[in-house]
Image (cartoon, coloured by chain):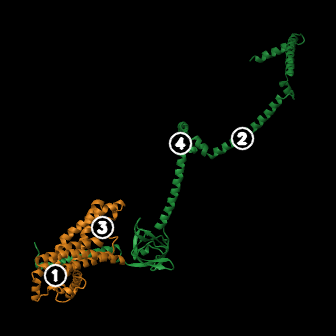
Chain colours: A orange, B green
Amino acid sequence: MKKDSDTLPEERHLISRKIDAFFIEIYEIFKFVRRFFGEAFSSPFEWKEFINQCYQIGYRSLPLISMTGFIVGIVFTKQSRPSLSTFGASSWLPSLITIAVIRALAPLVTALIAAGKVGSNIGAELGSMKVTEQIDAMEVSATNPFKFLVVTRVLATTFMIPVLTLYSGLVAMMGSFVNIHQNEQTSFAAFIKNAFSTISFLDINSSLVKAICFGFTIGAASCYQGYHAENGTQGVGKAANTAVVVSMFLIFIEEMIIVQFVNAIR
Amino acid sequence: MKPSKNNRPVIVGIFIMLGIAILIITVLTLGGQKKTFVKTFTVNAIFNDISGLLVGGNVWFSGVKVGTIKKISFYGDSQVQVTMNIEKEAQSHIHKDSKAKIGSDGLIGNKIVIIYGGTAGAAHVEKDDFLAVENGLSTDDMLATLQENNKNILEITKDFKSITKKIDSGEGALATLLNDASISKKISVSADNLQATLANLQRVSEGSKAVLSNLQSFSGRLNQEGTSINKLATDTVMYQSVKATLAQLNDASNSLTNFTANLKTLSDKLNRSDNSVGVLLNDPKSAESVKATLINLESGSKKLDEDLEALQHNFLFRKYFKKKEKGQLDEKKP
């Protein structure tokens, strides 16, 4: 399937070729997302492929996410201790770490790790299928490739990233507890009591909303890049790379917007 | 063992369920801590200044969290009505005359509402009641006081600087005291004297200690039943007797006083020359005259003795004397 930007004649550029191509890209992305929602809420639904993608994206990412979350918890605790100890407030470490983990670190770290692992995987997989014309072959064999390949993956990332965020948050808190218990001999009950004293339901809800947005962004950006890959194997590499870069960039932008929104309603 | 493709839905289901379980546990823990699922009732308080209190802030009673701030709204011209969700469990501890004030859960902590006081006899607080308010000390008030203290400290340090400058330049008695070496010697001598005095005082105190010990021993004996001193102190009969004796002694003393007064008068009279005894005692001429009289009397008596001796041997009286001598001899015989 050729893009509309490729079919535009040279003399029809509105501003310049590059600027026009940028806006056409935006339009293409909009169309891609609109098609996703159209396909996602129409039957038939590819349950088997969706479960398979959930397994690949969620379960297979769990060790990496857990390891990263645990290290983040320990490192952030160790880095925060000197600052709080200056004020004699090292007892506030659990609440500080919980705020940081629940509000920002858990969804952000999970999304960034998933963007690197899952985004590149989806971009490369769909890109190679695109350049080897497997997607075209699926269309010929009366299988909706968008529904089978894109909808399942985007939905899988949208559902799995929040779940991974919960795991990541839990493991990061455990890492933090291990470090705090070693240094301050804080009991688990006191840690939990202190940790949950400063967070609210809004923090948890906003964290889950963020994780859903990040998951959707990773899935959509990666699928878009892979689905529109071209120029052979070189295009596959470019699609994988761009999928990761765009996903991470969009994650940070979304993080900034959601934080502003949450702070406005806090 | 790598899971087969058929097992993947099960694994994904378990994975998702565990994630949901983490979420539920988090929500329940947070809800338990925030008392979200606890039955509450609302209580109001109207403050002049809530010092940045936020909705969702904690409400403490006797240092225990009993609720949260539900609503903050303006009341009247410039006052603020704070509506609090209070746990039903705490209702039986909060009385209608309890007071509310704005506090902080730490030195730099969040603002909270503190409910305190209340008399045991008063009725318990009820739904939508208004609690009396005490305007607590805000951070601004504390800073204002601190600023006042700073000013005072500044003035004190200025004064102190002026004093030290004067001392350093040798002005005033204190400067002389510090700078004059002779004064320090005098002080040293005074200190030695003081030390000696203290040593004496110590000896005196040791003596006093001994006296006290004796006194204690005496008082012990005084209290010991059966001793004479105890009897003296405790026996009422003896007391009456001693009292009578003392009264008599007093009378005797009075009589003695009168007697000595009379004796004094007598001696005064004897010292004077306006009476015969006084003249006899004090006039040298009279003394000489008396002396001469006595000499004459002695001479006269000697002669009289001789005359009487001669008379005994006279024939007229000889018989009488012999009879008298014979009678005395008879009396001596058994």
| Viewer-closest of B96 and A177 | A177
Query: Same subunit under labels 4 and 2?
Result: yes
3 or 1: mark nearer the eye: 1
In the image, what residue type sits under mark 1?
His
Do discs 4 and 3 share a chain?
no
Q: Is residue A212 left or right of residue B140?
A: left
Among all residues in the image, which is located at the extreme right? Answer: B316
**Chain under numbered label 4:** B
Image quadrant containing the N terminus of chain B: bottom left
Name the residue tied to disc 3: A97
**Are labels 3 and 2 on one chain?**
no
Query: Which chain contains the residue that carries disc 1?
Result: A
Residue A24, relative to residue B214: is it above or below? below
Q: Residues within 10 Å of mark 1 (few under 14, many from 20)?
A: some
- In the figure, residue B16 lies in which quadrant? bottom left
Q: Is residue B46 left or right of residue A75?
A: right
To the question of a shared chain for discs 1 and 2, the answer is no
Q: Position of residue A114 (x, y in %)?
A: 20, 74
- A88 or A27, nearer to the observer: A27
Q: CA distance from mark 1 to mark 2?
A: 139 Å
Marks 1, 4: nearer the viewer? 1
Q: What percent of the width, then of the height, locates residue B179?
A: 53, 41
**Pointer 4 with pointer 3, Cβ within 8 A:** no
The amino acid sitting under disc 2 is: Asn
Spatial distance from mark 3 to mark 1, Cα to Cα? Answer: 41 Å
The residue that mark 1 highlights is A228
Name which quarter of the figure residue B107 lies in. bottom left
